[in-house]
Amino acid sequence: MNANLNQIAEMDRNSVLHPFTQLKDFANGKLGDPTIVETGKGIRIQDAHGNQLIDGFAGLYCVNVGYGRTEVAEAISRQAYRLAYYHSYAAHTTDELAILSDRLVRMAPGKMSKVFYGMSGSDANETQAKLVWYYNNLRGKPNKKKIISRERGYHGCSVVSGSMTGMSFYHDHMDLPRAGILHTGAPHHYWGAEAGETELEFSIRRAGELETLILREDPETIGAFIAEPVLGTGGITPPPEGYWEEVQKVLRKYDILLIADEVITGFGRTGSIFGSQHYGIEPDLITVAKGLTSAYFPLSGAIVGEKVYKVMEEGADRVGAFSHGYTYSGHPIGAAAANAVLDIVEKEDLPGNARKVGAYFQAQLKEKFAQLPIVGEVRGVGLMGAIEFVADRENKTRFDPSLSVGARVSKAARSRGLIARAMPHGDILGFAPPLVTTKEEIDEIVAIAESAVRSVMDELVQAGER
Ligand code: PMP
């Protein structure tokens, strides 16, 4: 490392508070020097030492159009020169913002009406909660405010979105979840099903548990249910058969809004433009972020359905202005980036690529990993997939967490030039490559992953852990 890079690493270690990082391990060097990421092209990034890595996770499931897209960079630069900023409060707009909003309302599933913009998935879900509360206040239902999410769901890390997130390790020591946010069982058949229970039976049971929770709390106190069409950070788990149909029946019965958190699944990842379309979900509110700009600019949206919006507009005479908004709501550079990204999504048919190349990817994952003695389940949809490692396939027992099997496989992949993410909740290796990934690149990803998995498997056998 030359002097400059050493200095950068030192400045980073001294001054950056890194998200989701073991602070002491980072401070004392146990996590190694920070990787200084410098450039990216296609599905690859390059660090300051010239090392290339295949990004099998598209950053954090977000760089869907791949790195180094000059069309997007130029759109951003053009807008920055023309008009770097103006707010969108009280009847101000920009051409890029109006065009983007019209586009999103038409693209989105169901009868959508308006888009409210933020900067991250977390703040968009925070907005969704406020919309639910506002809607029910305006309807004269001031008690209908609680929001149900699912164990293993991930919806962000701000106060309400962090409470919606159904992972205790993101709550502990942070005074979360806050009151009024409840959790129901995860739609995770592999770990959640009882012996011999089919996917459909399991889905019916989960929907029944949801109904029991609603009745226990009193349906007049439940405002909304929020869920990802495909469980993302909770283990990249597609819904079990019949899940969405059964859950939606319950929500309709009790007049409960459905918020589809499409932060990962939006804009093609499942093979459909939205995960909602893929699974027959009819949301009232939709959260988008990540793929909206492919992370070229921080931009998120809370897409508001007609049913909710109508009540908001009708109530305006009584309550005055809709008093919610950020300085950067509808940022023109973000809107320009999103329009350029959506042009690529459409022109290159990225949902179609996720469907076609994704089918090949899923087949390869199954073929190369499903039969390995340390693999319990291989799952996924489109261009998102996961391998779950277990100590005993027959009895479904997890590895001793101290063996860090998932983290070791991820590290082994990384040392071979592939980023694949060790996910929480056990030993899971997750993949979510950019939606521009080709079949040949899938072959590279799978080959490296296979070598990494086999190397850790050999270590475990040698150590007598298998
Ligand atoms: N919802 C989902 C489904 C997510 O995956 C994420 C981020 N991984 C978020 C919300 C939060 O988004 P952000 O990190 O941009 O706040």
Image (cartoon, helix red, strand yellow):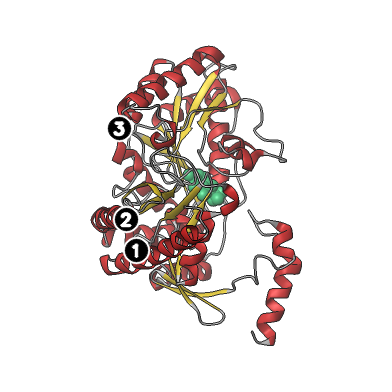
Residue pictured at 56% horizontal, 80% vertical: 48
Considering depth in this image, is 465 or 417 the residue closer to the camera? 465
Q: Nearer the viewer, mark 1 or mark 3?
A: 1
**Residue density around tag 2, few if under 14, some if 14–19, many if 20 or more, within 10 Å:** many
Q: Is residue 92 shown to the viewer in this render?
A: no
Disc 1 residue type (three-letter): Val
Q: Nearer the viewer, mark 2 or mark 3?
A: 2
Disc 3 residue type (three-letter): Glu
Which disc, if any, is residue 403?
none
**Residue density around tag 1, few if under 14, some if 14–19, many if 20 or more, within 10 Å:** some
Quadrant in which the N terminus is drawn? bottom right
Residue pictured at 51% horizontal, 55% vertical: 464
Q: Is residue 210 shown to the viewer in this render?
A: yes
| Residue at the extreme bottom | 2
Residue at label 1? 446
Residue pictured at 50% horizontal, 54% vertical: 406
In the picture provided, is 14 more to the left or to the right than 386? Answer: right
Residue at label 3? 241
In the picture provided, is 381 more to the left or to the right than 26? Answer: left
Q: Is mark 3 within 8 Å of ligand 1?
A: no
Q: Which circle's residue, 1 or 3, is located before the other in the chain?
A: 3
Q: Is residue 109 above or below residue 54?
A: above
Residue at label 2? 365
In the picture provided, is 71 more to the left or to the right than 426? Answer: left
Q: Which circle's residue, 2 or 3, is located before the other in the chain?
A: 3
Q: CA distance from mark 2 to mark 3?
A: 21 Å
Q: Are marks 2 and 3 in contact (CB under 8 Å)?
A: no
Disc 2 residue type (three-letter): Leu
Q: Where does residue 365 sit, x and y in percent of width and height?
A: 32, 55
